[in-house]
Amino acid sequence: MIKEHNIKKSPLLNDISFFKGVAGIDGLPPDRESEVCFIGRSNVGKSSLINALFDRRNLARTSKTPGRTQELNFFSLGERCYVVDLPGYGYAKASKDKRSDWQGLIKAYIAERRSLKRVFTLVDARHGLKENDREFFSFLDTYAVNYQIILTKIDKVKKPDMPKLLDKMNEKIKEHPACNTEFFLASSIKKYGISEIRDAMCLILGLDQNN
């Protein structure tokens, strides 16, 4: 079920760098031609996935402590595109005020950002969809924001459990009209699914993969 394309040079590996961290809606940089963002529950493996996608060890800071990402971190991909690392949701140890601030900033960004082409929502394959995943998906559905699920840590799922996981995910996706019907299986450690996600990002961002 999991496979890799032949190794090839992706445009995503050419020119990526940290641009700025945004703690409030007034700090958002001007829109570019296109951008995508990544979000998921705290400790879902978001930073590790971003690092794997761009083949950079420390592009996005990883931590075993949930809730480490506390700003909207913008990464500049050339001069035309942004990739955005959003704070994780579901981090219970953050203060109520802090969670409220993050939630408000994330929702304002997603609802109002004109150049945002897709939200990649990360779900830990071992645990499946949780209530706060469903709540966030409902928000995206309400605003008709195109989003696509990435099942992370797929290497931790036992092979006999895989068919049930995939069937369940396909059924859940049908309940969410703004969700892309195709989802990715990924492992940052094993590099499963990385090429497929890169290809999708290039297509969404309008990057030429032939150069």
Image (cartoon, helix red, strand yellow):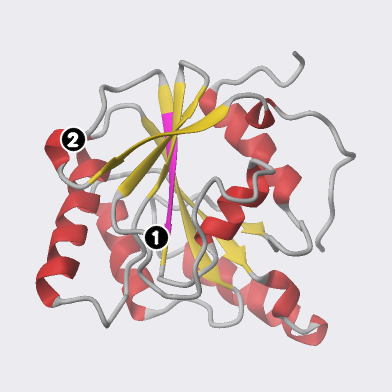
Q: Is residue 120 above or below residue 91?
A: above
Q: Amino acid at mark 2?
A: Gly
State which quadrant residue 69 falls in: bottom left
Instruction: Please provide the residue range marked out in magenta.
Output: 35-39
For image coordinates 18% across by 51% down, the residue present is: 105
Q: Residues within 10 Å of mark 1 (few under 14, many from 20)?
A: some
Q: Residues within 10 Å of mark 2 (few under 14, many from 20)?
A: few
Identify the element where label 1 is drawn: loop
Task: Name the spot of residue 13 as percent of width and height, x first.
Answer: 68, 31
- Which quadrant would the N terminus be assigned to in this image? bottom right
Provide the residue designation for mark 1. 176
Most distant residue in the right direction:
6
Provide the residue designation for mark 2. 27
Q: Is residue 78 above or below residue 196?
A: above
Helix, strand or loop for the magenta stretch, by majority: strand
Going by the image, does 47 lie left or right of 134? right
Q: Amino acid at mark 1?
A: His
- Tag nearer the camera, 1 or 2: 2
For image coordinates 40% across by 18% down, the residue present is: 33
Q: Are circles 1 and 2 on residues that touch, CB within 8 Å? A: no
Going by the image, does 210 lie left or right of 202? right
State which quadrant residue 169 falls in: bottom right
- Report the front residue among 57 and 94: 57
- Report the front residue among 144 and 123: 123
Task: Name the spot of residue 195 as percent of width and height, x first.
Answer: 75, 44
Task: Name the spot of residue 199 as percent of width and height, x first.
Answer: 69, 35
Q: Is residue 36 one of those drawn in magenta?
A: yes
Going by the image, does 94 lie left or right of 88? left
